[in-house]
Amino acid sequence: MESVVLKGLRMSDMKPKAVAISRRLCDLVSTSRQLVQTVLAVSGHAYPTGDRQLHPSVLDFMLARRSTPVKDLAEPAPTDKEIETMLTVASRVPDHGRLTPWRFILYRGDVRRQIGEALAARAIEREGALPEPRIEQERTRFSRAPLVIGVVCVPKESPTIPEWEMFLSGGMAAMNLMIAANALGYGTNLITNWYSDDAEGRRILGLAPRERVVGFVHIGSYDVELLERPRPELKTIVSDYVGPWEA
Ligand SMILES: Cc1cc2nc3c(=O)[nH]c(=O)nc-3n(C[C@H](O)[C@H](O)[C@H](O)COP(=O)(O)O)c2cc1C
């Protein structure tokens, strides 16, 4: 405690009253940390208990994270400022070699319906005559949610870093984008669908030939209770290392 320095001021230099207040504050911080740790322990959550600042709210948020069905994503869309925040978070991801192998395309307003018409025409070109409900499905692909953000992987030339890792970084950008949108109160759903695997579909959506779709993140407000889905049991996907793989 005596070594605590506040703005360059040593405890020993401070007036007694200020010292007492500082000590009380230190005690309070320590007590709150212990309280948080106790609550977490009781609730069965194994969170870190070291000296670093705990963020239980972030962990609880992540433990409850889930997608919103696209049909439930409605206006209002995020504001420009919120979109900027989301994209700033999205671009703050691990990126081997600092290649920035991704970019984002915003689909909003009237262009969403125009894209739908082009996708419907492309679907007919690929599959032949289609029933009206299916054509309507294609027409509305990008206009169900008020905002769709395309996360696009832009592979960069690199003698050392495999393209695979660039796609992984793109996946992280998409995940960060969704988490940021969720943190701002919006629902999200990542969709790829047939047009991501079709060169002409990608061209319609604004991608260059070498670029690939990580996902189209549908974003909007929602007013429904999100249903839980089964999650994998950790014991089925986690193990200690037991040596090299043997077939
Ligand atoms: C790469 C990728 C592509 C996906 N593409 C589709 C899709 O085309 N159509 C669809 O209905 N769901 C698709 N999904 C699944 C949705 O994102 C799904 O709603 C989500 O995984 C639900 O899980 P969550 O609640 O844990 O987010 C895709 C998921 C991933 C990871």
Image (cartoon, rainbow, N blue to C red):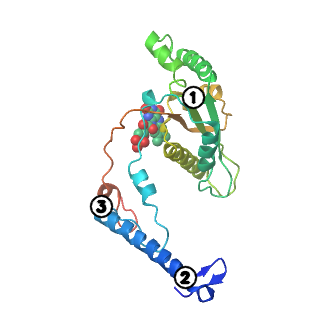
Residue that carries the numbered disc 1 in the rendered image: 198
- Whether residue 23 is visible, yes or no, is yes
Q: Assess whether mark 3 and mark 2 are in contact (beta carbons under 8 angstroms).
A: no
Residue 237: x and y in percent read 34, 56
Closer mark to the observer between disc 1 and disc 3: 3
Cβ atoms under marks 2 and 1 closer than 8 Å: no
Q: Residue 130 vs residue 6: left or right? A: left
List x then y, in percent, for residue 3: 57, 86
Nearest the eye: 61 or 129: 61
Q: Tell us which disc is closer to us: 2 or 3.
A: 2
Q: Residues within 10 Å of mark 3 (few under 14, many from 20)?
A: few
Tell which circle, 1 or 3, labels the residue nearer the N-terminal end: 3
Amino acid at the residue labelled 3: Ser
3D distance between C-alphas at marks 2 and 1: 72 Å
Q: CA distance from mark 2 to mark 3?
A: 39 Å
Q: Which residue is mark 3?
A: 43
Is residue 197 at all visible to an observer of this figure? no
- The amino acid sitting under disc 2 is Lys
Toward which corner of the image does residue 83 lie, by quadrant?
top right
Q: Secondary structure at mark 2?
A: helix
- Mark 2 — residue? 17
Quarter that holds the C terminus: bottom left
Q: Secondary structure at mark 3?
A: loop
Label 1–label 3 contact, CB within 8 A: no
First along the sequence among labels 2 and 3: 2
- Quarter occupied by residue 35: bottom left
